[in-house]
Image (tube, coloured by chain):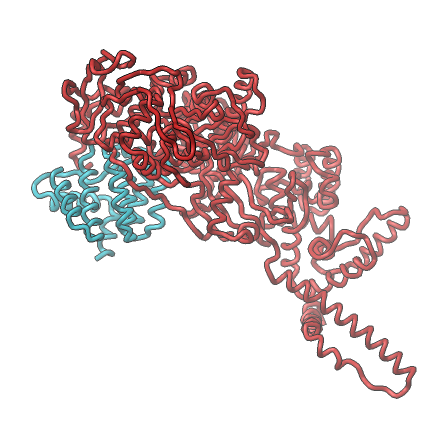
Chain colours: A red, B cyan
């Protein structure tokens, strides 16, 4: 009778016992009557022992089958950054691309062949991307040669055939995962994905008779016992791979005889029920191979990524030797912590590999010479961005149970742009330190949200000056009075109610009854009265009195309604003080509010997740784009023109220290009472950014919106190479020159001839219609005759 | 019918002829350009072409992902926003069809052809929503272009 036949019979036997164990009530059938009292006792004890043992083995058997047949591992949901799309003209330097590749776990190597490798020489980067399943399908690995000129990509070519590519999508960086309580991580692989060299080396080193034994290797145990006896200590183990798996899978680490017995029995049972391939694959996925901060690295596939930045199948002989060597003691032979020990162990394994002809003499010599870890530059993006992950987790919590996230191996494809995120974190920390020096106040904190201007995708979130501290996420949870940030809602309400940018507004004192408190008499920040000013000026210079007068005139309730339509959430109470921003919002909420200005009157729900894929890459959910036009483009155009002037001549002029005026950014400063909160919200041609600075205990910061938050915003946008904001006149806009004789002596616009946009038919008397101002960008250029002709041709 | 249409659409020459024919039929004597990308080498162009194929094949979720990708590369491509509107129309979401057409119109710049396509689709979407007066208004705007 051969082993496989015996396995069948044994399997049936144990299964029967296992089933019997499940029906404990039937156990009575084992006892039998006998006459002799002595024999009676003896047989009773014997039978009880046999029955007990049988039941126990049956119990172990059911434990094994339950775990092995069910879901063997809980897999955390893995969160990915957005994929980098490379195309000619993309604003990115070779340095930044290199950084991005390192973050995504690429390794630098001189011969770029295998996926996940890159090399740089001057302004050219060669890389081999890795296969990745996106929501729209598999993106295959590509060999690319990317050249840079200036701060842009000049060309992308296929390294193999030199063809120019118009667009190439790289595999995204893994930025985090949602762990179950037991903090284990692994990348699951199948038997086919296990390289033969690894399998042969592993069995040769750890369990020579793996393919033939029955779960135990008595000779190996005897040999180990003999060696240990001579050494007087446990220096050699006789455990088979099956026993090791059983130990890791089902048992604790204690060294007792009882555990050893359990281990042996379970190993036998495992071999009875499952094939060698099953056992080997489970072993390769389960084995503990190191610690990455709070995360335990399990399985060869993840270890391969973790130590060598390579897929398991791309490992070279020396790297396989390192991993197999580490099985004996992952911490003791850690290649990063104990390179010498690890190198010595690698030598031992390589010797075995050569002796057993797993590698050739040549491979052996090359492997002996190889560097222990071939990528010196390592930049783990793993759980590097807790503030962003926090937002992802909160959004997921609406659609998924906690358990789905920690056990089903979901893939979460997010909108995070690692470049933006890293720069935002850096600039926030730097600027806060700089401002603390300037004001002499310690404990300043801050938060930033950056999103894409048109589609509302959130690119970066900073929850505090220390990005790795995952405590209080100010971007999401610090709800603070927004001050003047609310003002555009007041002016937009006025513009939709017949006002123009040139309409005179009274910047004169006003006293109002405020429900529940004393009368309210607001003042201007500079404590001056500017008298009769154009509406534009009141917004650009953020005059409080003009704003309140205007807001009362159009109705506070209407302003609140506008704010809601812009995207402000929560309970907004129409007190007059609302007009000056006595309403609390988080930076994230402010971002949603300003997104509507940035996208020219369209409300675009901000998104942080694009799609969720199952472990087998099925698309489970995609969070699609949606838009809703909530305001006439003409009115929003007028407000945005005013917000551009905030930067060029109003409260935002200090920005010119960091950014060229050609950027033509639009934005608004905000400062709350007693300088407790310093805000800035603004947008460029491609990005929207909101910055908040303040103290956690709500003490004054001594900073205004323009002396604090604006500094962070300006430095941030400068570093991000933001694109110029070119506002195109929507249809129905006319331009006219206003002479400014109407305004009071306190007005900056008195006597100034100003070219201003108006909604068709609202040009005031006395103003002279004129053509639109020439823009700096190419887009405003009148199309040439060829261009115009081309539009009419079908090719 | 859809099958024949698909085959014709897939062949570049037929595509061109068909578009030309459509344009002629729809606009009487005036020669009108089809919605062709204005800068054929733009990075989003290939994606939009793929999205159009997915749209023809009524694979809306795929088309949507492709257009979203194109929009990440070229956020202010009016044609991409128009395709998004077509996708929503295919999905029967007339409300979002209207919104994406409006968005596309704000980015149409001087592209009268794109504006006309938007107004035509608006007419269909408003009709689908039972808003006949808005549909009529859209029809007139398309005709005036």
Q: Is residue A470 left or right of residue A328?
A: left
Name the residue rendered at 14%, 44% in the picture: B137
> Which percent across, then down, holds residue A657?
42, 15
Of residues A539 and A58, the one drawn nearer to the viewer in this rendering: A539
Examine the image and state in which quarter residue A140 appears.
top left
Q: How many marks?
A: 0
Residue A476 spot, x, y in % from top left:
49, 37
Which residue sits furthest left? B29
Q: Quadrant of residue B142?
A: top left
Q: Is residue A454 above or below residue A48?
A: above
Q: Residue at x 86, y 49 (%)?
A: A227
Residue A725 to residue B118: above or below: above
Inspect this view and state whether residue A148 appears.
no
- Residue found at the far right of this picture: A38
Rendered-image quadrant of the N terminus of chain A: bottom right
Closer to the camera in the image, A773 or A463: A463
Q: Is residue B48 left or right of residue B112?
A: right
User: Is residue A514 visible to us here?
Assistant: yes
Residue B22: percent from left, percent from top: 15, 46
Where is residue A326 shown, x and y percent of the image? 71, 43
Q: Quadrant of residue A321?
A: top right
Is A87 situated left or right of B29 in this image? Answer: right
A537 or A189: nearer the eye? Answer: A537
Q: Nearer the viewer, residue A366 or A11?
A: A11
Query: Which quadrant does the C terminus of chain A fall into?
Result: top left
């Amino acid at each position: 009778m051969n082993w496989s036949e015996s396995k069948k019979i044994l399997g049936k036997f144990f299964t029967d016992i296992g089933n019997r164990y499940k029906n404990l009530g039937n156990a009575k059938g084992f006892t039998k009557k006998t006459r002799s009292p002595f024999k009676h006792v003896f047989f009773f004890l014997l039978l009880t022992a046999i029955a007990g043992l049988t039941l126990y083995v049956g119990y172990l058997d059911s434990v094994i089958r339950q775990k092995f047949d069910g879901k063997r591992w809980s897999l955390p949901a893995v969160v990915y950054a957005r994929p980098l799309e490379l195309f000619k003209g993309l604003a990115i330097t070779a340095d930044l691309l290199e950084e991005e590749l390192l973050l995504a776990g690429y390794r630098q190597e001189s011969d770029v062949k295998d996926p996940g490798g890159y090399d740089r020489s001057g302004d050219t980067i060669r890389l081999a991307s890795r296969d990745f399943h996106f929501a729209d399908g598999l993106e295959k690995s590509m060999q690319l040669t990317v050249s840079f000129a200036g701060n842009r990509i000049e060309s992308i070519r296929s390294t193999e055939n030199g063809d120019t590519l118009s667009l190439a999508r790289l595999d995204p960086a893994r930025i985090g995962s949602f762990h179950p309580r037991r903090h284990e991580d692994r990348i699951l692989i199948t038997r086919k994905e296990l390289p033969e060299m690894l399998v042969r080396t592993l069995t040769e080193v750890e369990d020579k008779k793996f393919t033939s034994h029955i779960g135990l290797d008595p000779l190996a145990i005897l040999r180990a016992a003999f060696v240990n006896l001579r050494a007087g200590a446990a220096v050699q183990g006789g455990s088979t791979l099956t026993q090791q798996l059983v130990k890791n899978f089902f048992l604790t680490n204690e060294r007792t005889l009882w555990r050893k017995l359990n281990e042996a029995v379970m190993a036998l049972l495992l071999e009875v029920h499952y094939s060698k391939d099953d056992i080997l694959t489970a072993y390769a996925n389960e084995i503990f191979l190191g610690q990455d901060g709070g995360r335990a690295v399990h399985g060869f596939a993840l270890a391969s990524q973790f130590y060598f930045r390579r897929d398991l199948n791309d490992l070279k002989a020396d790297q396989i030797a390192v991993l197999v060597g580490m099985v004996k003691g992952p911490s003791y032979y850690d290649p990063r912590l104990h390179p010498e020990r690890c190198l010595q162990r690698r030598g031992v394994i390589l010797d075995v590999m050569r002796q057993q002809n797993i590698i050739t003499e040549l491979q052996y010599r090359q492997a002996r010479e190889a560097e222990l870890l071939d990528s010196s530059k390592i930049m783990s993006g793993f759980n590097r961005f807790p503030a962003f992950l926090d937002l992802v987790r909160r959004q997921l919590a609406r659609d998924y149970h906690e358990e789905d996230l920690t056990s089903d191996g979901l893939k979460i494809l997010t909108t995070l742009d690692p470049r933006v995120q890293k720069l935002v974190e850096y600039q926030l920390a730097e600027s806060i330190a700089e401002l603390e020096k300037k004001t002499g106040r310690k404990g300043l904190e801050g938060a930033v949200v950056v999103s894409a201007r048109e589609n509302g995708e959130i690119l970066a979130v900073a929850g505090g000056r220390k990005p790795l501290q995952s405590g209080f996420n100010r971007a999401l949870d610090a709800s603070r009075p927004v001050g003047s940030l609310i003002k555009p809602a007041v002016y937009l309400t006025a513009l939709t109610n017949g006002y123009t940018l040139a309409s005179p507004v009274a910047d004169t004192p006003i006293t109002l009854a405020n429900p529940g408190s004393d009368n309210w008499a607001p003042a201007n920040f500079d404590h001056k009265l500017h008298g009769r000013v154009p509406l534009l000026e009141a917004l650009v210079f953020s005059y409080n009195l003009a704003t309140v007068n205007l807001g009362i005139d159009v109705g506070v309730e209407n302003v609140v309604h506008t704010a809601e339509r812009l995207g402000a959430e929560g309970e907004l109470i129409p007190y007059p003080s609302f007009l000056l921003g006595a309403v609390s919002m988080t930076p994230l909420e402010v971002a949603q509010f300003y997104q509507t200005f940035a996208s020219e009157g369209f409300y675009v729900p901000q998104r942080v997740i694009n799609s969720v894929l199952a472990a087998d890459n099925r698309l489970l959910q995609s969070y699609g784009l949606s838009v809703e036009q909530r305001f006439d483009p003409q009115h929003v155009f007028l407000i945005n023109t005013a917000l551009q002037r905030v930067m060029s001549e109003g409260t935002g002029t200090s920005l010119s220290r960091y950014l060229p005026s050609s950027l033509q950014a639009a934005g608004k400063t905000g400062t709350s009472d007693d300088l407790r909160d310093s805000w800035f919200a603004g947008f460029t041609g491609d990005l929207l950014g909101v910055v908040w600075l303040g103290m956690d205990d709500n003490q004054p910061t001594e900073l205004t919106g323009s002396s604090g938050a604006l500094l962070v915003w300006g430095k941030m946008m400068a570093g991000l190479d933001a694109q110029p904001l070119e506002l195109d006149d929507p249809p129905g806009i006319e331009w006219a020159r206003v002479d400014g004789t109407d305004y009071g002596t306190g007005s900056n616009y008195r006597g100034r001839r100003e070219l201003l946009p108006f909604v068709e038919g609202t040009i005031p008397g006395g103003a002279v219609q004129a053509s639109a101002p020439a823009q700096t960008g190419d887009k405003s250029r009148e199309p040439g005759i060829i261009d115009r002709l081309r539009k009419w041709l079908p090719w | 019918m859809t099958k024949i249409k698909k085959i014709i659409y897939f062949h570049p020459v037929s595509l061109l002829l068909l578009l030309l024919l459509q344009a002629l039929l729809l606009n009487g004597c005036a020669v009108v350009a089809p919605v062709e990308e204005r800068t054929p080498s733009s990075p989003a162009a290939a994606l939009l072409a793929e999205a159009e194929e997915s749209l023809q094949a009524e694979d809306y979720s795929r088309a949507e992902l492709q257009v979203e990708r194109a929009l990440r590369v070229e956020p202010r491509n009016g044609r991409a926003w128009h395709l998004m509107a077509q996708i929503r129309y295919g999905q029967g979401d007339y409300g979002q069809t209207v919104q994406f057409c409006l968005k596309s119109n704000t980015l149409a710049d001087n592209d009268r052809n794109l504006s006309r396509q938007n107004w035509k689709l608006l007419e269909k979407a408003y009709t689908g929503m039972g808003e006949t007066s808005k549909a009529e208004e859209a029809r007139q705007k398309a005709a005036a272009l």
